[in-house]
Image: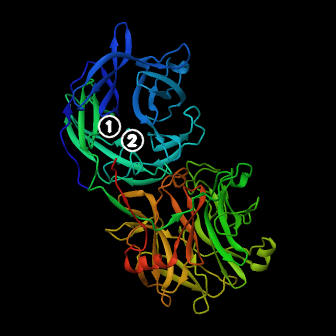
Amino acid sequence: MKKKTTKPKSIKRAEGIPLATVAVNGGVCLLERLDKRVGSHFFISWSTNGLDFSSDKREVSIKISAKKFESPKDCDNFSISGTPTGFILTYIRKGKGVGKKKMEDKIVIAKSLDLYSWKVMSEMPRGDTQRATVLYDKPLEHFVMYQDGMFVKSQHTKTLISWREKTSLLFTSRFGMFDAGEFSIVGSITTKDGLLVLYDASVRKAKKKLLQVGGVLFDLKDPRRIIWRSEVPLWQGIVESKSEKEDYFPVGFVYFHNNFLIYWRTSENDLILSSFPALFKEADIYQYKILDRFEQNPVITPRAHHDWEVIGTFNPAVFEDEDGVHLFYRAIGKDGISRIGYAKSKDGMSFEKRLPYPVFEPRDGSGKPDPKKVIGPQNYSPSYYTSGGGWGGSEDPRVVKIKDRIYMTYVAFEGWGSIRIAVTSISVENFKKGEWKWREPILLSPPGEFHKNWLIFPEKINGKFAIIHGITPEILIDYVDDFATFKGYINSPRPFGPQPGRKDAWDHKLRGAGPPPIKTDIGWLVFYHAHDANEPHRYKLGAMILDLHNPTKILYRSPHAILSPDMWYENEGKPGVIYVSGAIIRGKDLCIYYGGGDRVVCVATTPLKPFLEFLITGKPDNYELKKVSTKI
């Protein structure tokens, strides 16, 4: 999309402080504040062309209670949006007092039928929010609040009175892009394609400021789901300042005569305007829906009454037999130790059986941290041990069923000084009885090396167990006759951390392999995690096909990511993380199981045949094509 660059225009209006804008009946309404020696009051100015404003001299009141009204000087960072029956006002009320007696700042939500008489409906702590905006979602018949701050978040309510739903983290800044730094919400509007939120990503350079506006479109049926985000500024313009202290602040935006008008307030309370077409022909995006997320995601979440899995339940392993889909997941307890939990499903989606205790716990020398040997804090410290939030244990299991045994590899994490790959197994007979008699784990990777993401093929190759221990710069596979008698270690040259991927592709940096390989008619299907050069903070999922007879040979590779962390439950724990560690074929469908935000287990599916055709051709023509625009 081409950048929209124009010079902001000056606005003619009354001598007040501009606060917020909203489009009303073919015109533009501007909420302002007038400060005098005897006090301050709110008033409204109107414009029929978006440029020239004049006040009707009527005062605006915000009623807090039966006898109490809002003090104009205590409020800032306003946003106004329209609803089918009136208007919603969102603003920040500054806390009064000093020191320990100072009251906390509040986000305040008020409603009005006529823009002049407002009634406060609810308040909440401000936290790190600079600006917030509230929209009415007609299909869902509830209100949605978007808040900025360190990250953009959302909340929902039906009444405006009680915001009970937990705040959901939606998206963050993007390293290496125009919105790499801090940004704040400009305002919001409902379009036919979704809920559109514009945000200010401006950058100051000495006495010049580059004003930049980005946009995000949320799904009307799921206002936490991002269906479009601008890759370049929707509009940008350079403004000169008299000094480095002078600044420009967004007041709001309106849809007016097929254009978006964005209003900015200067440090001297002047008002300037930027505008650009509301229909972005260059910004239309065609999105292919390759993986369908399960509507009831997440399917496994932490349980508060179980200390061993109260922090996180994620990164699942799966296999299927005649009894259903069996899922092993990593669980982190209050002690910061990772253990393995178990759940079962008949349909692969709804897990009706879930054990109240772990089925595997770390052993000495293969996942159980020794405080005397741990590098760093001698006990659990979440800020230091960021490997999913734990400081030791059995992490990120993968399982395969080969004949009469179930084999599980996992990361034996004993603090940052020891990250190794271990393997254990259990007989199918004991598994069926619920007798968790695992064989003593053995360590496959040598001491002093850090390794993750090793996979066992689900069947023997030439009579031997095959283990993938690297996918870059080439596929690395070693073979073991029998794990029960295996001695020594598998030497893998892959260094720890992200590795170079394809230079000009979405998988610029590779993190590692995902679930165990899946055998298909065209080859071994292997998933892997990678980073885009423009978004190094977001895990994305890709796929490749390996030759059935020579699995070190890559036959096909996905031309772009097939899953990215776009949903709220993929960002609430550790933002930007999807970690696929289980996959099966059920009938004609491919089902993948993954951890979201290092906290929950999720499921996504796709028909297998068109997915394999997509990998072969590089063209997702068999998938639903949806055109996303911002047409009002």
Q: Residue 361 or 516: which is nearer the viewer?
A: 516
Q: Position of residue 136 (x, y in %)?
A: 47, 40
Q: Position of residue 111 (x, y in %)?
A: 48, 28
Q: Residue 445 or 198: which is nearer the viewer?
A: 198
| Quadrant of the rendered image containing residue 337 | bottom right
Relative height, residue 589 to residue 572 (above, below)? below
Give the residue at mark 1.
254
Q: Position of residue 328 (x, y in %)?
A: 67, 67
Give the residue at mark 2.
189
Q: Residue farthest to the bottom?
A: 462
Relative height, residue 162 to residue 277 (above, below)? above
| Quadrant of the rendered image containing residue 19 | top left
Q: Position of residue 177 (x, y in %)?
A: 32, 52
User: What amino acid is labelled 2 in the image?
Assistant: Ile
Pointers 1 and 2 in contact (CB under 8 A)? Answer: yes
Relative height, residue 610 to residue 563 (above, below)? below
Crowdedness of circle 2 by 10 Å Cα count: few (<14), some, many (20+)?
A: many
Q: Earlier in the sequence, mark 1 or mark 2?
A: 2
Task: Report, in whole angstroms, how far the alpha carbon at label 1 lies from the one at label 2.
Answer: 8 Å
Left or right: 385, with 37 as reference point: right
User: What amino acid is labelled 1 in the image?
Assistant: Val
Res 217 visible: yes
Relative height, residue 27 to residue 333 (above, below)? above
Res 491 visible: no
Question: Callout 2: helix, strand or loop?
Answer: strand
Question: Callout 1: helix, strand or loop?
Answer: strand
Quadrant showing the N terminus: bottom left
